[in-house]
Image (cartoon, rainbow, N blue to C red):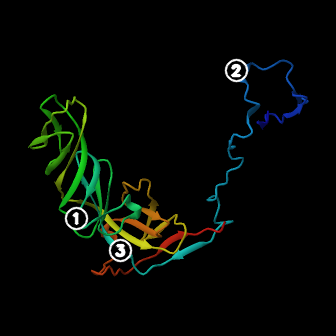
Amino acid sequence: MGLTLWIRLNWCLILKLSNNMFRLNNTDLPVSPEPLSSMGSVCRFWYSETDRGMGPLLRVNTYANWWTNPGWTVDDLSPEKPDFIGDYSTVSVNAELVDVRIIGYTKVLSADEALPDNFWFSADKIHFYQKTTPTEAIITFTSSISSSAPYTISIPGNFTPTAIYPGDSFTQSGTSLVIESAELLAIGDSITVTGALTINPVVQCAIASFFLPVEFLDQVDWIGKSFRSCKDIINPILWEFTWNQPSKLANTFVDRNYLPDFQENNQVTGIQGIGSLTYDR
């Protein structure tokens, strides 16, 4: 039977396979066996046709001391103005969102894909790259039944339901929905609700977007500020930036009070530049 031998070297041990037996050669072997509980694995066997990979033998930190011996070149870009500027706004929804539709807006997956009049959503929040002001969203969410028949669920404020599942009919009372259903339901069961939500987005900060002719973007310095790479592209925060490599789009999240004066066509003056890194590998 074909075998694949993986050997873990400890104390420079050498294993030899001879006559179906293992022979261990070393000039510094202990006089008695070590307790089994404290021994590490010496080798492992797998069938040779089994595809198994090894862990890395070496890891290289390509960011270490790059200024003394860089493995890439540094590009210093100075665009005259951002390609787009708008507001980053959010609407909190007291529900577990499943889908959102907004007339005049296009849905994207996350902040790194967003352009003006785009939106994305998280579990209980709608996020906007806002140029025009939306006033209504068609949302679908789930909520849990909180009582036995007649079944009751909680819904967001300023919400008008239009459809439920499961359920035959419903009656709204403020932020409660009473559901009539021929199907037997239990407390804790989930109901899916669709309807219109009146919204008033709250501005968090501004967004300035740049299309940049680079492959990788690791740092942005602009208007006297250093931007951090965004840790959560669904929930960006002030002084972070996102980078979408396929579209070459960088979105910076900036305090609007720091922005230079710009005209309606997004003409901006006083830009100090974008710092970026491209790599030769």
Residue at image location 25% in from the left, 31% down from the top: 188
The residue mark sitting in front, 1 or 3, is 1
Residue 61 horizontal side relative to residue 182, left or right: right
| Label 1 sits on residue | 103
Quadrant for the C terminus in the image: bottom right
Are circles 1 and 3 on residues that touch, CB within 8 Å?
no
Q: Nearer the viewer, residue 11 or 49?
A: 49
| Label 2 sits on residue | 37
> Residue 10 appears at what percent x and percent y?
79, 34
Quadrant for the N terminus in the image: top right
> Residue 17 appears at what percent x and percent y?
87, 32
Q: Is residue 119 above or below residue 26?
A: below
Residue 145 in sight: yes
The residue mark sitting in front, 1 or 2, is 1
| Label 3 sits on residue | 84
Residue at image location 87% in from the left, 19% down from the top: 31
Locate residue 153: give its quadrant.
top left
Mark 3, secondary structure of its residue: strand
Residue 225 horizontal side relative to residue 153, left or right: right
Locate residue 181: give its quadrant.
top left
Q: Nearer the viewer, residue 219 or 266?
A: 266
Residue at image location 9% in from the left, 44% down from the top: 174
Q: Nearer the viewer, residue 118 or 227?
A: 118
Residue 4 tag number: none
Given the image, on which type of amino acid does mark 3 rest? Answer: Phe
Residue at image location 43% in from the left, 62% down from the top: 242
Given the image, on which type of amino acid does mark 2 rest? Answer: Ser
Residue 161 horizontal side relative to residue 109, left or right: left
Residue 239 in sight: no
**First-in-chain label (1 vs 2):** 2
Residue 55 horizontal side relative to residue 87, left or right: right
